[in-house]
Amino acid sequence: MKNFWYLFAAYTVIWAVVLGFVLSFYLRERALRREVEALKELLDQRERHGGGNRRDT
Amino acid sequence: MESRAGTRTKLDAGAASSGLGLPLMALLALAGVLMVAALYLALIWAPTERLQGEVYRIFFFHVPVSWVAYVAFLVTFVGGLAYLRTGRPAWDRVAASSAEVGVVFTTLSLATGSIWGKPIWNTWWGWDPRLTTTLVLWLIYLGYLMIRSYAAESSQGARLAAVVGVMGFVVVPINFFSIRLWRSLHPGPSIGTDVGLQMEPAMGATLMVSLLAVTLLYVLLVIARVRLRALSDAVGEIKARLGVGGIQ
Amino acid sequence: MATLGQAGAIVWKDAVAELRTRDIVLSVAVFAILVIVVFNFAFQPGPQGIGAVAPGAFWVAVIFAGTLGMNRAFVLEKERGTLAGLLLCPLPREAIFAGKMTASFLFMLVVEAAVVPAFGIFLDLPLFLPGLVPILLLATLGFAAVGTLFSAVAASSRSRELMLPVLLLPVLVPVLLSAVGASAAVFAGKPFAEYCTWVQILVGFDVVYVVLSAWVFEYAVQE
């Protein structure tokens, strides 16, 4: 089949780019979730140090 | 200022909402099935083209990706207008996510168009009117993404980008006419019309399935990106309230 | 017609400010001439090729130089804080836009008045072609409208010298193509009927973009 490599290249590019894009979503979401965990930690710390009924002015 | 408990429940809620619900899973499954079907039809079932041989099969994904890219920018245009009028961040999230997916699809359109062009015209780029209009479109929306990231702060970035999205979309039809007129005076190779893609009904059917698959892919990608933005915005908001500085 | 008066006041203010310093107009005109010279060295058209390269070189010079000039003007305003001051006045945003657009338009015409003769001399082309005038006016108007709007957008962002051309040039493609196409026809002495489509595109672009830019301007300058 002539020009096979062009056909292959085109379809490969499509899938590589789409999958790469989806992968970037996954990585960004993972980073965000880590931040959420860190923020929860921070909250816990402040709760412990500030005592039970710290009222905001 | 809200209580610590309130902030904590917000964090939990934000994390939970990014889980996949039933309708989304169904959509995902449908997209998977359609994509596999489209690939089979495009690569195996569709007949061989008389003049171009097998390489023409790029057409079955090149065309839908190009069309959907234009739809994506239409969504950015509408979302941007709505954001400018109402100021609600949800509109901006949709507009921006659609622009990102649109840029990715436009890149694919240019890449597949060029790869298809090489064996047919014997050159990687022939200033074909449709490809050229797509190239200008790509540049416009790269500018959209750039202005967002170069803005001093994010709500300003959203507003300026919405302005760019509106101005940039309106030029598209004018652009297409002027480029087509230019090309009629300086002719050169042209996808589809030059070497003459002989369309048979089987090819039309394949194109329809592929178009559906690509459209569904677009929808899913935008939904995913919007949710990611919503999560990112929520985290940013909470960080601001807690008085935590730093990245993102 | 209070708006007209307000717009006029802004044009006058910008014109006076520019006349006093004269620096932007001069440097932009010099830049435009430089572009033509560089084009000649880069492409070395020779007497036969001149006709093909000329209209393109002219419009590229005008657009690049104009982009630089417009950028300067807005950045200066932002730095001096005069833009914020202008926005505090109870003026409708469309009036501010109209004033600024007209000021840019006149500024560009002045630059073109310098470039056209330089062009005619360097490339040995007929200096005065009446057919060129409507093309110059229409293309410059479109350029001024979109340029003013995008200058406001770019001035609010971080990499403003880079952002203006990046935003402006893709949207100006129809103007560039039409101006070059029509100019080429005029240089070749073709009758109007042959290039009227280009002029139609310029008119259509101007109508759409003057209105759109005026409407969208308020969102571009909000703080």
Image (cartoon, rainbow, N blue to C red):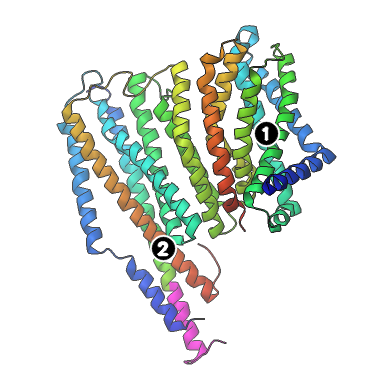
The residue that mark 1 highlights is C66
Q: Residue C80 carries which label?
A: none
Q: How crowded is mark 2: few (under 14 residues within 10 Å), some or many (20 or more)?
A: some
Q: Which chain does the numbered disc 1 sit on?
A: C
Magenta stretch, main secondary structure class:
helix
Q: Give the range drawn in magenta.
A: A38-57
How much space separates mark 1 and mark 2, taking CA atoms? Answer: 41 Å
Q: Residue at 28% of width from left, 31% of height from top?
A: B58
Q: Is mark 1 on a helix, strand or loop?
A: helix
> Is B167 situated above or below B125?
below
Is B80 covered by the magenta stretch? no
The residue that mark 2 highlights is B230
Quarter in which the N terminus of chain A is drawn: top left
* Viewer-side label of 1, 2: 1
Q: In which quarter of the image is residue B213?
A: top left
Disc 2 residue type (three-letter): Ala
Q: What element carries label 2?
A: helix
Residue B153 image offset from top left, x and y in percent:
57, 59
Quarter in which the C terminus of chain A is drawn: bottom right
Pointers 1 and 2 within a single chain: no
Q: Residue at 66% of width from left, 47% of height from top?
A: C95
Q: Quadrant of residue C50?
A: top right
Q: Residues within 10 Å of mark 1 (few under 14, many from 20)?
A: many
